[in-house]
Image (cartoon, helix red, strand yellow):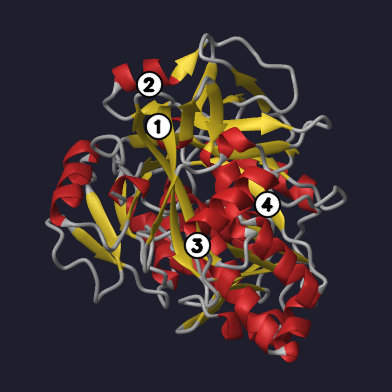
Amino acid sequence: MKLSDLGAAGSRLALRFPELTLDYAGLAAASGAVAEAVAGKRRVAVYASARPHTAIAVLGAIAAGVPVVPLNPKLGDRELTHILTDSAPDLLLCAPDEGGHIALDRHEVDPAARASFTEPATDSEDPLFIVYTSGTTGAPKGVVQPRRSLEATVSGLAEAWAWTAEDVVVHGLPLFHVHGLVLGTLGPILLGGSVHHLGRFEAEAAAEALTAYPSTMLFGVPTMYSRVAEAVEADTGLAGRFGAARLLVSGSAPLPASVHKRITAATGQQIIERYGLTETFMNTSVRIDGERRPGTVGLPLAGVDLRITDDAGTEIGEPGLVGEVEVRGPNVFREYLNRADATAEAFRDGWFRTGDMATRDPDGYLRLVGRRSTDLIKSGGYRIGAGEIENALLEHPGVAEAAVTSEPDEDLGERIIAWIVSSASPASEAELIEHVASTLTPHKRPRVVRFRESLPRNDMGKILKRSLG
């Protein structure tokens, strides 16, 4: 990625945010000013709010060959202190009115700044990002992603989705996360296209962006698409606007089959799902010319090798059996910063052990069923993925939200627990248990159903199962 290449696109739209629109010439010049300010630094932190300043800061640092540590603006003091101590950035890049509580030298990003910059030579293995994990199983780890990971992911998705410079991507995703920053912002810019960031996601604003400008692709997470489903069912005009998009793409968590069906029924659109991690960027996707099968995340991207293994590390070839997803390829991270032990533990014979559990359909399509640490349930001698049960529960009209966990059981080893937020027409515990038993198989039925008014979620809409109890 070269700023000179960005500038060559001239007056072509690059970024549109509620507060600012930049063409490629302006983006290259503003990023050039950042590159001048950070040149020679070891690494920099970026206060990654959903504003154009974040995109300008990241592009400038990349141009200068300086690794970026994206900071979630909502980080608490303890987690922020850990990340800054662990990564030791030399400088904070931020908007003038942000990041005042962070004890670092700062450079305030000015979208109106103009400078040219001669970019240094770089290598594909040079660090690009240090992105911190969510820390659900201990202190957050800094994932060192090299420049090749970005290039591999964008080229792989461009091939899978026929994604080109003619596309305009709409989203309202956070920019401290791989989904919003790498796919939703850097992806379009690398391909010479445009980004329309909504600031915050609202179904009506997304519908307007898809037709008023116009735009061609929408990126979102399941909670966003649940709002879209409600909106298009209530308003046929909105349904037509979403139906005009070239692609609707969902990621960051499995999209319930029920949401797939509702949006397709209202708009005629079939959502594409893809699968990635902080450590791997993107691994798989449903292709634009492939079957858009609810509950699946498609096939490996070009250059990505993927296998499913049992507890001993032996590859599972039989379709339908649950195992751990392992990945290798140019998209995989280099290391965990300052954690040689964790890095070594994460790999087996050159394959990254994702911790995600999945099955494969006979044609190779991947079905995620949950995380090994929280979603693999061993009950009555069976290995069961929580995600499969959650999808079955969400197909019941009495269920608005669902999460599945387990707890120890003297007879079964683990018993399956369902956590339910009821819809306007609630179902009883017995009805839901019978629904799962008849939809899947009896050994996958919940033994206990617990009703809640809401389920705890993080910023990307993922349910925080460790908070259930």
Which of the two discs, 1 and 3, sits closer to the camera?
Answer: 3
Closest to the observer: 424 or 62? 424
Q: Quadrant of residue 267?
A: bottom right
Few, some or many C-alpha atoms within 10 Å of disc 2 (few <14, some 14-19, many ≥20)? Answer: some
| Marks 3 and 2 close (CB-CB < 8 Å) | no
Q: Could you tell me how far apart the alpha carbons at marks 3 and 4 are, in whole angstroms?
A: 32 Å
Which of the two discs, 3 and 2, sits closer to the camera?
Answer: 3
Which of the two discs, 4 and 2, sits closer to the camera?
Answer: 4
Indicate the amino acid at tag 2. Answer: Thr
Which mark sits nearer the N-terminus, 2 or 1? 2
Closest to the observer: 5 or 67? 67
Determine whether, in the image, residue 125 is placed left or right of residue 363: left
SS at mark 4 in the image = strand
Indicate the amino acid at tag 4. Answer: Glu
Q: Could you tell me how far apart the alpha carbons at marks 1 and 3 are, in whole angstroms?
A: 29 Å
Read off the residue under disc 4: 273
Indicate the position of residue 401 as horizontal and vertical percent values: 50, 62
Which of the two discs, 2 and 1, sits closer to the camera?
Answer: 1
Q: Residue at x 62, y 63 (%)?
A: 219
Q: Is residue 282 shown to the viewer in this render?
A: no
Which of the two discs, 3 and 4, sits closer to the camera?
Answer: 3
| Marks 4 and 1 close (CB-CB < 8 Å) | no
Indicate the position of residue 179 as horizontal and vertical percent values: 52, 54
Read off the residue under disc 3: 428
Residue 343 is tagged as 2
Read off the residue under disc 1: 373
Q: Could you tell me how far apart the alpha carbons at marks 3 and 2 are, in whole angstroms?
A: 46 Å
SS at mark 2 in the image = helix
Which mark sits nearer the N-terminus, 4 or 1? 4
